[in-house]
Image (cartoon, rainbow, N blue to C red):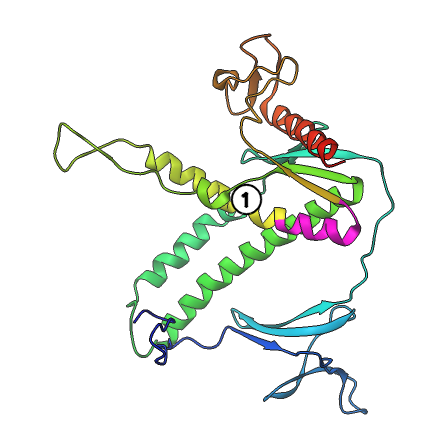
Amino acid sequence: MRQGRSDTGLPTLQGRRPLRHRHLPQGRRRLPLGLHPPHDTQTRVRLQGVGHVRVHQHRPVQGHVKTISVKREENRWYVVLACDEVSAEELPPTGAIVGIDMGVAHFLTTSDGEHVGNPRFLQAMADELAGAQRHLATFPKRTRQRTKTHRAAARKVAKLHGKIRRQRADFHHKTARTLVRDHDVIAHERLNTAGMVKSPAPKPDPDRPGGFLPNSAAAKAGLNRSILDAGWAQFLGILANKAESAGRLVVPVDARNTSRTCPECGHVAKGSRVTQAKFACTACGFTANADHIGATNVLTRAGLVLYVAA
């Protein structure tokens, strides 16, 4: 029986780690969130089986609370409320439409020619994180009782990962908010990030039994790390949520050959992508920034999608 899964109806194996997440459905009852008792000036939330727990409420609760989730990150606990019947805060129309091209050299490039830099949060803290992980690796992986030093080393690694995660999420929220505020329609590539970061398959060497040919696994590993550090999937999810809340439209389009198609003559060729940053059409000689070409083609395809839908 595998960890955390039971196909036979028997109890599952439980790890020694403390509780990190708990989901509490509320049904049709309203979650009692507010001041309790009346003379108490602190905001508290009532958890079934626990009681009233003091919380730091950073914004008012809107709509009808359906579920509550309690999660633990490092040594911090968070209460997440899922609400329905929340009215959308639509922004005034701008009449602008934009296409964006996700990348690694630049986090994204718009069809207007604007580049948004890639902060590379993981790379910025790589040395500090590597040192903390090396120190953690000196302790045994499986032990019944962790020492105080072992627990401190594990907390330090988790703390660094949490900081990187929060920095990346903050950057994604701010970038998505800017796009949603300034444009009515936002087009982007439909990306399969999980498939893009797969390791290349090994190539057996027919001349050497048991040997393998070079498959550029090292270079692909560096690209995979950069893609995951950028967090394209998380950003596109945040963008879609903010656009829906603001009454904007997000249009995903086919990502194939967006950076290999000439916007002037429509010629598609792999050789037109001279370098990572330069595009030069092999048919008509048109040259431009490759990321800008990709964003322009994304915008063009979004226009076709909207035309067909109309």
Q: Residue at x 40, y 66 (%)?
A: 153
Q: Is residue 306 above or below residue 237?
A: above
Q: Which residue is mark 1?
A: 230
Looking at this view, is 113 or 96 the one in front? 96
Q: Position of residue 130 (x, y in %)?
A: 40, 52
| Image-based side of 23 in relation to 1, left or right | right
Q: How many marks?
A: 1
Q: Is residue 240 located in the magenta-colored stretch of the structure?
A: yes
Q: Position of residue 128 (x, y in %)?
A: 45, 53
| Image-based side of 272 in relation to 145, left or right | right
Quadrant including the C terminus: top right
Q: Is residue 179 above or below residue 87?
A: above
Quadrant including the N terminus: bottom left
Write the start and end of the magenta stretch as one range.
237-248
Residue placed farthest to the right in the image? 92
Q: Amino acid at mark 1?
A: Ala
Q: Residue at x 79, y 51 (%)?
A: 246
Q: Is residue 207 above or below residue 59?
A: above
Q: Determine crowd level at label 1: few under 14, some 14-19, many 20+ residues with C-alpha closer than 10 A.
A: many
Residue placed farthest to the top in the image? 284
**The quarter of the displayed image where residue 154 is located:** bottom left
Q: Is residue 274 located in the magenta-colored stretch of the structure?
A: no
Q: Residue at x 56, y 20 (%)?
A: 278
Q: Residue at x 40, y 72 (%)?
A: 151
Looking at this view, is 208 or 244 the one in front? 244
Q: Position of residue 13 (x, y in %)?
A: 35, 77
The secondary structure that most of the magenta stretch takes on is helix
Q: Position of residue 28 (x, y in %)?
A: 71, 79
Mark 1 secondary-structure assignment: helix
Looking at this view, is 307 or 291 the one in front? 307
